[in-house]
Amino acid sequence: VVSQKAPGFPILITTCRGDEAVALEAMRLGAQDFILKGSPDFRMLKRAIRYAVERKAALEQRDQVIRAAADGMVVVDAASTVRLVNPAAARLFHPASLLGKPFPYPTRSGETTLIEIPRAPEPPLVVEMRVSPLTWNLEPASLACLRDVGEVRRFEEMKTEVAQRRHADQMKDEWIAKISHELRTPLTIIKGAVSELEYGSAEPLQPDQATLVKMAQHQVNRVERFVLNLLELSRLESG
């Protein structure tokens, strides 16, 4: 109650001899230290007050770091009850509230796992969870660090798809270049032979022969245009 009414103040408990268990329970609930009643040692009292102030400041700094973290962070005690949820984690689990409730995933210190957070009617959120040991109010606990890796996975999948497309385009360009080379070389020879038949003969061609030569020349020119168009199309698609 005191820590809720005055969250910014350190709490120092005074107790009688034999009540150390009560004092430790008070520290577990948020007090910073305790001293025995009736102690005449004012230096001990001064030291206890200074320690309480320093410990309170250290705990507040720890909580501020957790709350300000870009990754989601959830403090889970030994009974799997959630003790602290930072804003980033609250956004991951929105609209559900975790504080004071059982954490729905196993927390094994030192492990990194992928969990899925339901987001109906949308697909579940894929989150990487790293669990580290932590002491929370003098008791062992776990700190679950949560990071949305769904976007990262989609980005990696997109990178893989782009790489595959580039590889396919490269193979296509290489195939077109090879086919074009294989076609242009014999076309040049055929075109020269047809021209030689049409213009280089010592004797004029017979009408039937001239018709065949014209048809051959037309087909050679058509295939040559096709090869040139194929190369031009490949250059345009490659940018």
Image (cartoon, grey):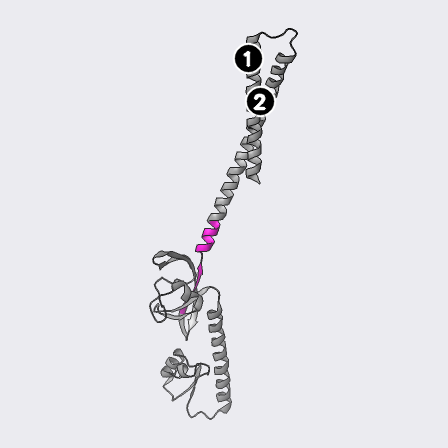
55 or 61, which lies in front?
Answer: 61
Image spot of residue 4 (x, y percent): 40, 81
Residue occupying image coordinates x 55% and y 24%: 223
Which amino acid type is marked by label 2?
Asn
Magenta run includes residue 153: yes
Quadrant (top left, top right, bottom left, bottom right) of the C terminus: top right
Instruction: Determine which residue is flagged by label 2.
Output: 221
112 or 14, which lies in front?
Answer: 112
Q: Is residue 41 above or below residue 75?
A: below
Residue occupying image coordinates x 55% and y 23%: 222
The stretch in magenta equals 141-156
Q: Are marks 2 and 1 in contact (CB under 8 Å)?
A: no
As helix, strand or loop, the secondary structure at mark 1 comes to: helix
Q: Residues within 10 Å of mark 2 (few under 14, many from 20)?
A: some
Q: Is residue 143 visible?
A: no
Where residue 30 sits, quadrant-wise, is bottom left
Residue occupying image coordinates x 47% and y 82%: 52
Q: Is residue 133 above or below residue 158?
A: below
Instruction: Determine which residue is flagged by label 1.
Output: 212
89 or 19, which lies in front?
Answer: 89
62 or 206, which lies in front?
Answer: 206
Image spot of residue 144 (x, y percent): 42, 64
How many labels, in total? 2
Residue occupying image coordinates x 49% and y 91%: 42
Magenta run includes residue 164: no
Which amino acid type is marked by label 1?
Leu
Outermost front residue: 207
